[in-house]
Image (cartoon, rainbow, N blue to C red):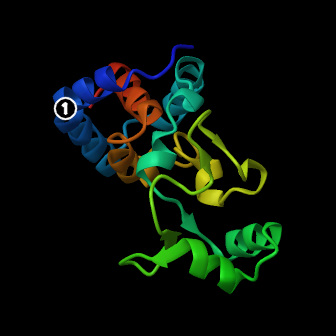
Amino acid sequence: MLPVNFRSFRRKLSINRKSFRSFLNKTAKNSPRGIDTISAIVEKEVWEEVDCLSCANCCKKMTPTFTKQDLKRISSHFKQTPDEFRKQWLRKDRNKDLINKSEPCQFLNLKDNKCSIYAIRPADCSGFPHLAKKKWSEYAHVHKQNIDFCPATYKLVEKMIERVAV
């Protein structure tokens, strides 16, 4: 597994973003037969090639949404009330979801790209980047957003384009 090369990632993204988004739009609207099976196989390959700890771009450039359960669990860990934790670390976005006030994530250790609350991290973080967790048609729109930030998502879409005819 090689560390993520951000220069290469950004260059490939600028070249392929439009075609990747087109593929995601087409397959979301009309999922080819077997796409969910193929994406599950490809996901395993992606994790053999992409080292998240060499990247952490999700924690640096994105923010999870915090559920009520996340808020209770994480605030308890810090011996705060959910309201105290929310006021200290979170804000509401335009959809009224609770998100981090700032980027990078306050719980990211920038020296080693590890999460300081990994065992109790938000559900959104534990599932990220949501490669093959649900049907392709239900998550293609999420992949379309994530290809701009996540090399694993980029690699998934790249491999899916090679294997799925649209």
Query: Looking at the figure, which quarter contains the N terminus?
Result: top right
Question: At which x and y percent is residue 142?
Answer: 41, 52
Outermost top residue: 1
**Depth order, front residue of 78/95:** 78
Question: At which x and y percent is residue 99?
Answer: 50, 69
In the depicted structure, whether residue 110 falls above or below residue 165? below
Residue at (60, 52) in percent of width and height: 125
Q: Secondary structure at mark 1?
A: helix
| Residue 7 seen by the camera | yes
The residue pinned by badge 1 equals 14
User: With 17 as the anchor, is 49 left or right in this view?
Assistant: right
Residue type at the position of mark 1: Ser
Task: Determine which quarter of the picture holds residue 68.
Answer: bottom right
**Depth order, front residue of 138/148:** 148
Question: At which x and y percent is residue 82?
Answer: 71, 81
Residue at (58, 25) in percent of width and height: 47
Residue at (44, 51) in percent of width and height: 139
